[in-house]
Amino acid sequence: MGTARWDADDWKRASSGTVGKRTEDIFTSMGLHPTLNPYRVTRESRDSLVNPESNAIIIGLDVTGSMGIIADAMAREGLGTLVDEILKRKPVSDPHILACGIGDSWCDDAPLQVTQFEADIRIAEQLKMIWLEKGGGGNNHEGYHLPWYFAAQHTQIDCFEKRGKKGYLFTVGDEEPPPELLARHAQEIFGDSLQRDLSTGELLTLVSRMYHVFHVVVEEGSHARAHLPRVLDRWHKLLGQRVLRLKDYRRLAEVVVSAIEVNEGRDRETVAQSWSGDTSSVVAHALGTLPAKPARSLFGLVRF
Amino acid sequence: MKRSATAVIGANYGDEGKGLMTDYHIAPAGPDGIVVRFNGGAQAGHTVTTPAGLRHVFSHFGSGTLLGAATYLSRHFVCHPALFLKEAAQLEGAGLAVLPPVFVDDRAPVSTLYDILLNQALERHRGQARHGSCGMGFGETVERQLDPDFALTVADLRQGAGYLLHRLATIRDRYVPRRLADLGIASLDAQCAGWLASDGALQSFVHAAMQFRRMTQVARPAMLTDYAQLVFEGAQGLLLDQDRGAFPYVTRSHTGIRNALEVAGEAGIEALDVTYITRAYLTRHGAGPLAGELPGKPYPGIEDRTNVPNEFQGRLRFAHLDLDLLVRTIQQDFADTMRYPGIDATLHLAVSCLDQVGPAVAYIEDGILKTVPPGLLADRLAGRLAAAVAYTAWGPTRDTVRIVRRHWPSVEFDEAKSKCFLPFGG
C-alpha cells in the first residue's frame, strides 16, 4: 500500500462532503468493517517509484464514548492538515499514514480498527469506515496498547527494514494506559497465540524497536478533565517526555506534526513559533515536555 | 428443584397451536418458568394471544415470553442473530419493558447471511418445484454445519467480532462458491450477487451477532431444574421430521420428542408429560404432499393471521384429519421415550381450533369420512391414543383451553348419536 501521493485538493473534496454533518452521519458504519479488521492481517508500508523514501506514521484515535468528538474532528480537518503539513514541512519524506480506531479490549466489539498505510485520499475513505462504537467501560483505561502490539507484530515498514529509520506511532485519548494485553484478547483481536499476558511496558519495548511512540493526552476528554494529574502521571511513568498534552483537540494535527519535527531535530521553540495565533500556544503547551533538541544515544537501540 | 417437565409437540405439519399450549402450560409459573426450544430455529411461527388481546408470533423467543418466562435455546436450536434482534424489538414495541432472560447453549449452530442467500438463491432456482422452505437459511445452516471448516456455533460468537468476520469471510470465499457449484447454480441474479459481494452486509451481520451475544447468557442444562415450570416447546410438526416425513418436503430437524429427551436427560428431569397437539383439521404451509387436500377452507370459521401467503411458501392448505395416520405418527414418536428409561414419560393430547369448525367436525377414520361434534373428536382421539389428559382449545387464548381427564370410551361411537351434533359441555 501507499503507492500514491497525497494531493491537498483530494482532502478538500473528501472533507467538503462532511461539512455541516453530525458525527453519526460521517461515520455511518455500524459495526466493525471487514477491511478494518486486524484479525490475522499484516499492513505494509513499502517504498515505490512515487514514494521512494517512505516513512510510516500510525495515528491511533480513541473512539470510545467520551472521545467520539476527537475522531470527528480528525475526519473533518485534522488528518488533512496533518498530511498537508507533513508534506509542506517535510519533517519526514513520503509519509505513509495508517489510522487506528481504539476501543476497549475488555468490553468493545471492535477494540481495534486499522486502515491500510496510505499516502493519498484513500485514507479518508477508510476513516469513514471506522465505527464510532462509543463503548468503553468504567475501567479508566482504553486499549492504547493495541496499536502498539499491532505495529510491533503486524506491520512491515520499509523505512525501518531498508533504512533503519523508525516509524512514528501516536495514540490519542483521554484515559490511562491499560495494565497489560491479555493473551485471550490477543487471540480474539489479532488471532495470535501468546504464551502469556504482556505488560504494557513489555509492549512498549517491543514496539519501540521499530517506532517512535508518543501519546497525546486530550485534556478536554471527559475522563482527563476529571482526573488529569492521575492520567498524566500514569503516562509520564510509561513514556517519560513523549507525552503530549493537547488542550485544544482541533489542533491535533499541528501538535503531531510539531512533535515529529522536534524529534527529527528541529528546535522546539522555533517549531512552536512557526504556527500562527492560538495554535502556537497550543503547540508550545503540548511540546513542553519534549527535549528542545533530541539527545542522540551512542548505544545502539534505545527506547527514546 | 423440580424434576418434572412438560413438552409440546406438533403432530402434523406445524401450525397446530404449540404457542398456545406453551403459553397455557407456563402460565401458572409466569416469570418462574422457562421455555426450552430444542429443534428448528427462527423460521418457527408460534402464535400467542393473551386473554388481554396482546398477540405475538414467536420465532426465536420461547412462547412464554409474554408471561415473563425465560427462554432456553438448546444445542439443537439454530440461532439467527438478525431475526432475534428483530423479534426483540417487536416484543419491546409490544410493551414488554424488560425482556426475560434468554440462555443459549454454546454448541447451538448459528445461521449466517450466506445461508439465507444460498437458501433463497436455491428456491428461486427451483422455480415451481419448490420445497416449501421459509427462505431463512435454516436448511442451508444445517448443511454447512456438516463441514467442520465452516461450522459456526454460539461459542464462535463469544470469540469476538474480529474472529467472526474472519470466519465469515472464509465461508463467503471458500464455502459459498463450492456450495453453489454443488447445487448446480451457475450464476446468481444481480440482487444475490450484490449481497454476496457486500462488505457492508457482512459487517451488519457481525454487528447483529455481537448484539445477540450481549443480549443472551450462557446456558447450562443443570439450571433448568431451578425453575418452577419447565416447558419444552417443539417446532414444526411430526410430519415434517427429517427422517419420518416425506423427503424432500421436510425440515432438517428432529421435530419429535427425541431432542427434548436428550436435553431433559442432561438436566436430570425424571418425569415428562408430552402433549401432542393437532388442530381439528389438517393444514400445511409450503410445498409437499397433503393427502386428501381440499380446494379451500373446510370451515368458514377458519381464520389464520400467522400464515399469510409469502413468496417461498404460498398460501395455507387444508385437509381433514386422518385419525389413523395421526395415531400412528404420535405413537411412533412417543416410542422414542423408551430410549430414556430414567425419564417417566406420559402421553397427553391437545386439539386446537375447535371453535372454528362449527357444530360438526369431519375426520377420516378407516378411510371413511365421519362427522362428529367437535368435542367428541378430542375424545375419540384421546381414547385411541390412551392419552392420560386431553386439552381442548376453543379459541386463540389460553383461557379457552379446557382440560379433560377421564376414561375414554373405547367402543365405537354410535353412528346415529354422533350425528346429533350435541353441543360439547364444558
Image (tube, coloured by chain):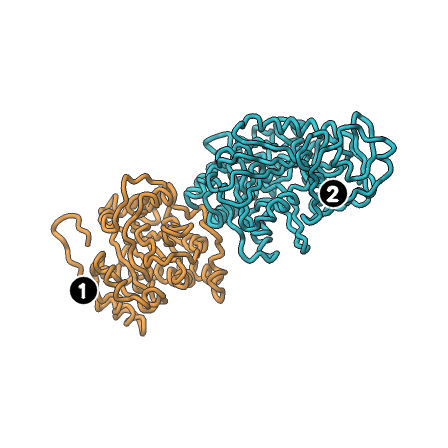
Q: Residue at x 57, y 44 (%)?
A: B60
In the picture, residue B231 is in which quadrant? top right
The amino acid type, in three-letter code, at marker 1 is Ala
Q: Chain of mark 2?
A: B
Q: Nearer the viewer, mark 2 or mark 1?
A: 2
User: Are both tags, 2 and 1, on one chain?
Assistant: no
The residue identified by callout 2 is: B353
Q: Chain of mark 1?
A: A
In the picture, residue B335 is in which quadrant? top right
Q: Residue at x 67, y 31 (%)?
A: B239
Classed neighbour count for the residue bearing mark 2: other residues with Cα under 10 Å, few (<14), some (14–19), many (≥20)? many
Residue B373 placement (x, y as % from top left): 81, 39
In the picture, residue B35 is in which quadrant? top right
Q: Colour of chain B?
A: cyan
The residue identified by callout 1 is: A292
Say left or right for B40 vs A177: right
**Looking at the image, can residue B173 be seen?**
no
The amino acid type, in three-letter code, at marker 2 is Cys
Q: Colour of chain A?
A: orange
* Of residues A163 and B316, the one drawn nearer to the viewer in this rendering: B316
Label 2, label 1: how far apart the Cα atoms are: 87 Å
